[in-house]
Amino acid sequence: MADATLAPTLDDWKARAARARIPTEAVIDGKSVASASGQTFDCVSPLDGRLLARVAAGDAEDIDRAVRAARASFESGVWSNRAPAERKKVLLRLAALMLEHREELALLETLDMGKPIGDSSRIDIPGAAGCIAWFAEIVDKVYDEIAPTDPSALAMITREPVGVVGAVVPWNFPLYMASWKVGPALATGNSVVLKPAEQSPLTALRLGELALEAGVPPGVLNVVPGFGETAGRALGLHMDVDAVTFTGSTEVGKYFLEYAGKSNMKHVSLECGGKSPHIVMADCPDLDQAARAAATGIFFNQGEVCNAGSRLLVDETIKDAFLDKVMAHGRKLQPGDPLDPKTRMGAIVDERQLGRVLGYIEAGKKDGAQLKMGGTRVRADSGGYYVEPTVFDGVDNKMKIAQEEIFGPVLATITFKDVADAIRIGNDSIYGLAAAVWTRDLTTAHKMARALRAGTVWINCFDHGDNTVPFGGYKQSGLGRDKSRHALDKYTQLKTTWIHLGR
Ligand code: NAD
């Protein structure tokens, strides 16, 4: 074991991995439990294809148990009726516990979904704890309203928790995305049933345990691991779930709209896919900085990022020189052992996703795009799933690799002639999650920011943000917003209380 004051090395992380405790049971009504059916599913590490653990496979019965526990806790008022300042204290304890367990959580995240340990320990876990703390801090600072009615009435507009919230999250930032839901949902007094992705259940299970340790009452945060088609579907169709908050693919997001229509018209908010245009104008203020941002914008987290800058739109007059710079940065991001603190690109989440990514690379070649860099599986002898940073040039925006979300380290380069052309191509997508523009012209920057149909537009940077700003999509990238005080809208509903005072 390394000196605690030194950053752990690859050998330290391997030793820790060998003796790590892997949580495998659902957390329902304050207890760790097996699935009602006794069924489990294999949790396989993408690092080396090794079986990490057999995790409880929750299905409709487990979801029902969890929803009943959530409902009972909500109705009892043990959390929903607590003063916001009291909920704040408990959630700040939870955030502190997450940071205390940062290395343990980072290790689980890396083993489970393949991201580099440097990222999980420096980005995912502190980011998740920070989000919980941010929503803890805001909730005793928001006020309700009195409406400007006729003086004969007093009309109060108050926010109330929606009740039981189902949270369904993906595998690319498992704990981080869970915190975007659980933070505001718990802060506003709801009870929650969290269903992590089947590819990455471990940190969510640990979150459920830590929440109990922090003092979140039993039944208020339940975590049910299981497959989308069983557990996820059951949550979407449950008649006693008041709201579903989902992050995942556009395809599955649409199922949740259907589930709501077929059941109790529960509120649905969706954070879905993207195909973000990363636009570099000829007057880009710093081509080196933009090239670094373009490379990390697609290769960070193995390209498994909803807002990845997967379409690089470059002015045709600077394209060749710019792309050389992007590739020079990309070459430095070769996949390595995710447990090595020096690794900057890790493993693809599972064998199925590996197949999907390689399939898109083949489609790009078949459609006539030029493969300039990467394009193959590497480190296969490890037993894990790794793909080189891959760059296509000569892409037409109509091609499959420009239209569909690959969710892997594959960049599609497209040229444009002028501002109007860049906006047209940028907006020619079913998605509208994010976009970026590099220009030194203030007018171009503002005009493009207005014209691009995306929930976030970055100017002269990429993927910047914090808890203070909303995040979410236009078009088929979603409905509703995570983060910021606007996220509170998803977890509360407005009540009007009209008191007749008389004259
Ligand atoms: P996914 O849609 O396959 O799965 C997401 C969740 O839905 C998982 O928990 C899964 O078990 C569940 N699910 C799957 N099928 C289901 C069904 N039929 N019924 C109910 N639930 C079901 O997505 P993924 O592959 O886990 O994650 C990648 C996707 O997530 C990408 O499209 C990415 O863009 C998106 N994403 C979006 C954001 C955002 O904020 N907009 C953030 C991260 C990821």
Image (tube, rainbow, N blue to C red):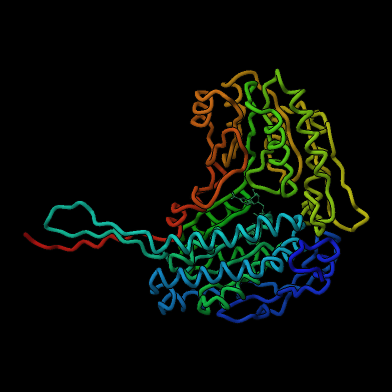
- Quadrant location, the N terminus: bottom right
- Quarter of the image where the C terminus is located: bottom left
Asked if residue 434 is positioned above or below residue 128 in the image, the reply reads above
Residue 225, horizontal then vertical, whole percent:
66, 69
| Nearer to us in this view, 382 or 269 | 382
| Residue 242 sits above or below residue 438 on the image | below
Ligand 1, by image quadrant, is bottom right
Q: How many marks?
A: 0
Residue 68, can we see it?
A: no
Residue positioned 23% across, 54% down in the render: 147
Q: Is residue 213 above or below residue 284?
A: below
Q: Residue at x 71, y 31 (%)?
A: 288
Residue furthest left as drawn: 503
From the top left corner, tell me how far across and down residue 222 is, in percent.
Answer: 57, 73
Q: Which residue is more in the foreground, 192 or 337?
A: 337
In terms of image quadrants, where is residue 49?
Answer: bottom right
Q: Residue at the spot x=54%, y=44% of the render?
A: 473
Task: List x then y, in percent, for residue 71.
Answer: 47, 75
Q: Nearer the viewer, residue 241 or 178?
A: 178
Question: Is residue 256 visible to us here?
Answer: yes
**315 with respect to 473 (left or right):** right
Percent from the top left, x then y, of residue 15?
Answer: 84, 69
In the figure, residue 399 lies in which quadrant? top right
Q: Nearer the viewer, residue 311 or 326?
A: 326
